[in-house]
Image (cartoon, rainbow, N blue to C red):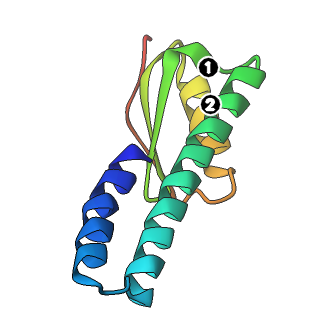
Amino acid sequence: MKTLTRKYAGLVVVTALLGMPLTHAVANEKASEVQDVVSDSWITSKVKSVFLANTDISGLDIKVETVDGVVALSGVVPTTAERDLAITKAESIKGVKGVAADGLKTSQ
């Protein structure tokens, strides 16, 4: 969130100094980027909470990151069945466009 604020803070200052209004397109771009960040954060939080609530998944052992709706899972879980369950659960979350689980390994 801070990155977006910093990115557009300079633009706001420059346009104010020049007496130019921010265009509708720039405002829409900013809103879209903020929405993407919020959506990715929401997806990450939701996936992590589903993992932690499920007793069949080692939620603390799985790192979850989301970029543009694609969830990346990494870490080490005890079994292939648990790895597959984590992938399935992540795929079932609203807004998830895909799951990359190359970094999610099994200890067996």
Residue under the point 68% across and 50% down: 93
Element marked by disc 1 = helix
Please rate how many residues cluster around mark 1, counting C-alpha atoms within 10 Å: few if below 14, some from 14 to 19, many from 20.
many
Element marked by disc 2 = helix
Residue under the point 53% across and 25% down: 80
x, y (%) of residue 29? Answer: 41, 76
Taking the image as shown, residue 11 lies to the left or right of residue 41, namely left
Q: Residue 48 carries which label?
A: 2
- Front residue of this view, candidates 104 and 67: 67
**Tag 1 residue:** 59
Q: Image quarter for residue 2?
A: top left
Q: In this view, does 62 lie above or below 35?
A: above
x, y (%) of residue 35? Answer: 54, 63
> CB atoms at circles 2 and 1 under 8 Å apart?
yes
- Front residue of this view, candidates 81 and 91: 91
Residue under the point 62% across and 60% down: 95
Q: Is residue 51 above or below residue 69?
A: above
Q: Image quarter for residue 58?
A: top right
Residue under the point 60% across and 47% down: 43
What distance separates the C-alpha of mark 2 from that of mark 1?
7 Å
Q: What residue type is labelled 1?
A: Gly
- Front residue of this view, candidates 82 and 26: 26
- Front residue of this view, candidates 89 and 22: 22
Quarter of the figure that contains the C terminus:
top left
Q: Which amino acid does label 2 sit on?
A: Lys
